[in-house]
Image: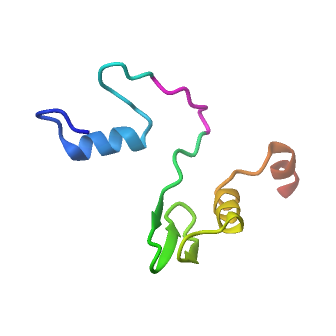
Amino acid sequence: ELRDGEDAGAVARNRAAGRVTGPGAAGPSRAADDTGPVVRLYDATSATVDLRTGLICPAMPTADDLRRMVLAGAALPPEVAAGDS
């Protein structure tokens, strides 16, 4: 909810970046390598789009669809990534 005089765009950018402000707001604790929020567009009549990964599924996502979207955006563990060289 916006307070009087607040810029909606600035509030949205701050929330997306994890910067919560205002009375009683607790500061988020995030790791330096945190990928931030997963952003998806849901439309039960057409499709769900994961904007972070570009994955799309018809209508509302199943548990398998959500798992696929989350894992597609996850970083590889260091022990696996080290074997790529």
Q: Which residues are magenta?
A: 27-33
Q: Quadrant of the C terminus?
A: bottom right
Q: Which residue lies at the image location 59% right of the left edge and 33% below the top edge?
A: 32
Q: Is residue 83 left or right of residue 34?
A: right
Instruction: Say which quarter of the image contains residue 1.
Output: top left
Is 59 drawn above or below residue 26 in the view shown? below
Q: Measuring from the top left, give residue 55's x and y in whole percent.
A: 58, 71
Which residue is pictured at 85% across the width and 51% down the height? 80
Q: Main secondary structure of the magenta part?
A: loop
At a point 33% along the width and 44% down the height, the residue shown is 13
74 or 79: which is nearer to us?
74
Residue 35 screen position, x and y as percent: 57, 46
Q: Nearer the viewer, residue 61 or 10?
A: 61
Tag count? 0
Would residue 52 be seen by someone viewing this image from the given angle?
yes
Q: Position of residue 77 (x, y in %)?
A: 80, 46
